[in-house]
Image (cartoon, grey):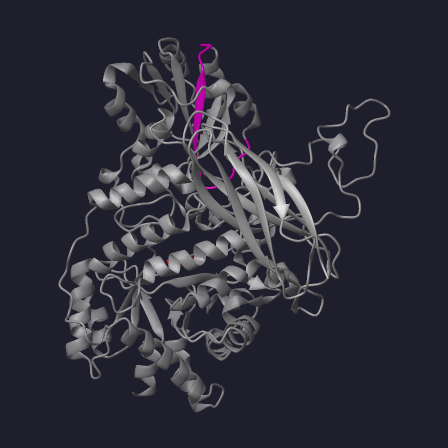
Amino acid sequence: MTIEEKVGQMSQSTSLATPFSENIKQEIRQGRWGSFLNAGSPADRAEAQRIARQESRLGIPLLFGRDVIHGYRTIFPIPLGQAASWDPALVEAAARTAAREAAAEGIRWTFAPMLDIARDPRWGRIAESPGEDPYLASVLAAALVRGFQGASLDDPASVAACAKHYAGYGAAEGGRDYNSTWIPELLLRQVYLPPFHAAADAGVATFMTAFNALNGVPASGNSFLLREILRNEWKYSGMVVSDYNAVTEMIAHGYAADASDAARKAVNAGVEMEMVSTSFRDHLPALVKSGDVDRKTIDNAVRNILRLKFRLGLFDEPIPSPATSHVTPDSLAVAERLATESTVLLKNRNDLLPLSNSIGSLAVIGPLADSRVDQMGTWVMDGRAGDVQTPLAALRQMLGDSRVHYVPGLRSSRDTNQQEFSAAREAAGRSDVVLLFLGEEQVLSGEARSRAYLNLPGAQDALVDAVAAAGKPMVAIVMAGRPLTFRETADKVDAILYAWHPGTMGGPALAGLLFGRTVPSGRLPVTFPRSVGQVPIYYAHLSTGRPPLASELGVPAGTPVDPHGYTSRYIDLDFTPEYAFGYGLSYTTFEYSNLRVSAATVPMGGTVTVSADVTNRGSREAPETVQLYLHDVAASVAQPVRVLKGFRRVILKSGATETVTFSLTTNDLAFYNEKLQPVTEPGQFEVWIAPDSAGGVKGSFTVK
Ligand code: GLC
């Protein structure tokens, strides 16, 4: 290969235009591009592949990548919603479906899973994240890699996955997208790297470097991340692509003087393919000639790129013929199940839910009740609005049109025009129960969609007030790409279902939950703050030297002697979250009891089992996600008050009791010490088996 052909393999372009231009086809013949992202139609891709294979000097196939983030044609809940299912097997099945649909249209590389731990709901990309916890995120990371990549990459229904955005992107200061991240290495290793390590261990074929500077060094020029951690420590053998223009953005970062400097720093740090910007193509040949870049560096990068293409079978497969994917009954069934399991019941006063089928009529209020595009959520390129079944359509199908009175009340989630409010209130007056569909439109979360406020946008709270005047029972169904703060509205309604953006089958899933065909089982993968003023707030926090006391809950009375006390809390807001990590209600109640530990003392290197009884005290069979939390009481580096160490989904019949047992080795108790080594130290440990990060039954043991 000439140096130009090598650098061509290291260059990825895009083309919003379809069909591809003659210029692009000529460049493919010249071997100027190794890959395209988000480009063309299936026919364009097939033609481009034919040209690459038959009309270029070396016949090296192109690799087509795409953002298949939470579905291709069949759209599943946004990743934050999928995380709320705590069901890795189902998340894997959804990824498998997405891979099959994408591969059929010539896409063999997806830029997923996104594995950025997110503890700041102001950040728009929390919608794409697996939430705030590294353990849950790591389990999901492995499941998604298995789903996308299948048993082997050369399966024509498999796509190469991409662990992104490496690393620390979710810690953007102020929740502002692309902003600086300052993460001590200990925290980086304890919280932000584990999901990426899990993806690497699961065999993820590629990594993508993040936009952010990590401790002043942009991720695309960060050899600590790309060489020391990824290659030397994790022995990773896959391929590394930059994010979109992230290489030349190092100039704007103030880290590279110009495009040539950016290319040199990126390729020497370990970036192997440049996404869209062309500094590699424009400058690497000269940098190799001048000796600023070692030829071996180029050869290693090209080897990794070609190896990926061989592993995908691209050299051997026949030229693909253009095909079109469609949703199928099977794909829709997976989408409905995952939308069902992702939905979290946050409130159910007087067991208003599930509603009875004998109900007279329903008022359905709010524009999100019937918004096909919004329901799919962020990062949707190939989902068809025509395939989406909205809650309104599903409810009409279930009850008949005459029993469903729909008044949007607002034209969109940001609308402030209250002209329709009286019609909404009137519809409520004619109905037995009111369903309020609230939340965020699709465009209010995702990339470059950070918000300084977390409230319901527009005049939605006022719409709730207007409808509340009818005095009927009310259920809020919230569709959003992030945790929102809506306490006043939450107090006014009787029940709340948090549906995130539920995707193509959100309607049937929500109708099934509302009328009890299914039971809510979602559990929050991220803490919900009471106010944006509490952010960042997350469950696995340190105690501090002055932890707030249970007696200090609520807001000080404001009398002359109040506020008083010197503990870590606010004087104008309760210090606890609105809803805790792991929280979610059911249509039954589960009782946790009788926690037992297999031994009071555990030798270093030993194993301890922790068990508890979980009883279904209600009248319905239901799933429950039983969670295991640990606290290292005294350690050489202070440890969080609780850390998730395991979870198990059980399904219990009414009245049934199941003993749920977890096993922990002393390695599972390890944390990173000041020398950045994973260590387990002797001492006391507390352990919970719990329904969420705030409750449960507790025990303890000592490691000798
Ligand atoms: C975007 C995103 C990244 C995506 C890539 C290609 O800017 O940061 O997640 O995969 O560019 O669209």
Residue at horizontal 61 percent and vertical 34 percent from the top:
530
Q: Which residues are magenta?
A: 470-485
Question: Which quarter of the picture shows residue 67?
Answer: bottom left
- The percent coordinates of residue 596 (x first, y second) are 62, 45
Q: Is residue 79 left or right of residue 22?
A: right
For the N terminus, the quadrant is: bottom left
Magenta stretch secondary structure, dominant: loop
In this rendering, the answer to whether 357 lies above or below 79 is above
- The percent coordinates of residue 645 (x first, y second) are 57, 53
Residue at horizontal 33 percent and vertical 34 percent from the top:
509
Name the one closer to the observer, 689 or 21: 689
Q: Kindly give the residue lying farthest to the left in the view shown.
A: 321
- The percent coordinates of residue 486 (x first, y second) are 54, 29
Where ligand 1 lies, by quadrant?
Answer: bottom left
In this rendering, the answer to whether 468 lies above or below 307 is above
Asked if one can make out residue 283 in the rendered structure from this viewpoint, the answer is yes
Q: Is residue 192 left or right of residue 204?
A: right
Name the one closer to the observer, 326 or 694: 694
Q: Kindly give the residue lying farthest to the front in the view shown.
A: 598
Name the one closer to the observer, 278 or 531: 531
Image mark count: 0
**Magenta stretch: residue 466 in it?**
no
Residue at horizontal 62 percent and vertical 42 percent from the top:
595
Asked if one can make out residue 538 in the rendered structure from this viewpoint, the answer is no
**Magenta stretch: residue 479 in it?**
yes
Question: Which quarter of the picture shows residue 203?
Answer: bottom left
